[in-house]
Amino acid sequence: MSAGSDSLPLTVLLISLGAVLGAWSRYYVTRFCTQRFGLDFPIGTLLVNLSGSLLMGVAAGLFRIRFALPNLDHLFMVGFFGSYTTFSTYALDVHYLFRRRAIAPALCFWLGCPLVGFLCVELGIAIALWLTTGISF
């Protein structure tokens, strides 16, 4: 993307709209998981981080790698996923698990989120490439 190729007001609007939708989505996913599964393990944060990583991989494959679509990049990559994924919440949840001396769940959550999240991003990019080119890995 070259400098000046997009309108700043449109960019701000797209990022803001994506951020609102991402925050609402995060809230309702974590709320549902808390009501359904309780507070013993932060399943809502895990689900948001993993689904966000997978979908961000697909979006990166589509909007950045395959098709250069800066407006959709702003809406989804910066706006939606910037507020939907919850790394800071993840870190706080790890803190609370350790503080409650839930050592095994804390270690699984602390190590599992980044590892499986990375694998989800890779899978998402592969899915996007497969959908758009038929290339498989």
Image (cartoon, rainbow, N blue to C red):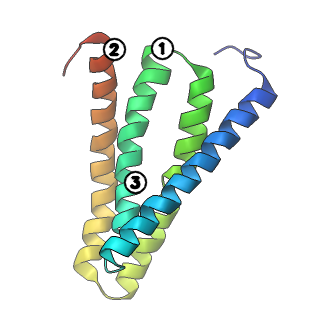
Q: Nearer the viewer, residue 81 or 111?
A: 81
Q: Please identify the quadrant where the N terminus is shown.
A: top right
Mark identifier at residue 132: 2
Q: Determine the image quadrant of residue 48.
A: bottom left
Disc on the earlier residue, 3 or 2:
3
Mark identifier at residue 49: 3
Q: Amino acid at mark 2?
A: Thr
Q: Is residue 113 left or right of residue 20?
A: left
Q: Nearer the viewer, residue 48 or 118?
A: 48
Give the residue number, with chain letter if any, for mark 1: 67
Alpha carbon distance from label 1 to label 3: 25 Å
Number of numbered discs: 3
Q: Amino acid at mark 1?
A: Phe
Disc on the earlier residue, 1 or 3:
3
Picture coordinates of residue 67, whole percent (x, y): 48, 14
Residue at 43% from the left image edge and 59% from the top image edge: 29
Alpha carbon distance from label 3 to label 2: 25 Å
Q: Amino acid at mark 3?
A: Asn
Q: Is residue 52 left or right of residue 132?
A: right
Image height of 84 relative to 13, above or below: below
